[in-house]
Image (cartoon, rainbow, N blue to C red):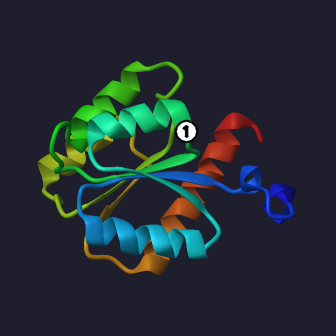
Amino acid sequence: MFGLFKSGKKTGKVKILLVDDEPDFVSTIKHHLEWANYEVVVANNGQEGLEKAASDKPDLILLDTNMPVMNGHDMLESLSKDPQMKNLPVIMVTAACEVDDIATASSFGIVDYIAKPFDFAELKEKIASSLEGKKHLSGV
């Protein structure tokens, strides 16, 4: 908890990987998250998301479903097979809210699902809740 009060060091910020292919959405959410004192890394598709998850070691992933190159479900499947990344909390942030989409994402152990469009306060609450769950699982 006290890591949040470090003087300007980026290492004290929670790092979120935002994986989405809609530039306007990415720009808006990135701005809001940075304003809320999160460090944000952006990927434009699932393949790039996997690469950035491995290199940037985020604390949480916000993931869209429908994207080019590799979709969100395929990224989730790849994450679930990687021992280093399979326990990363993932919140699906998507317009794909059919029962099958939610069931598929849930089968890979996502921590939450939020439908576009949404209220940013709701997203912040889900992020905080997911990070709290991660602390409990890791014993921090």
Give the answer, above or below, for where 71 lies relative to 26: above
Left or right: 13 in relation to 62: right
Give the answer, above or below, for where 41 lies relative to 107: below
Which one is nearer the viewer's eye here, 137 or 30? 30
Which one is nearer the viewer's eye here, 105 or 31? 31
Task: Please tell me how many numbered marks the rendered image carries.
Answer: 1
Q: Examine the rendering and report whether any part of residue 87 can be seen.
A: no
- The image quadrant of residue 122 is bottom left
* Residue appearing at x 37%, y 70% in the figure: 27
Which one is nearer the viewer's eye here, 74 or 41? 41
Q: Examine the rendering and report whether any part of residue 62 can be seen.
A: yes
Left or right: 7 in relation to 138: right
Give the answer, above or below, for where 86 lies relative to 44: above
Q: Amino acid at mark 1?
A: Asp
* Residue appearing at x 49%, y 75% in the figure: 32
Residue under circle 1? 56
Give the answer, above or below, for where 128 lies relative to 119: above
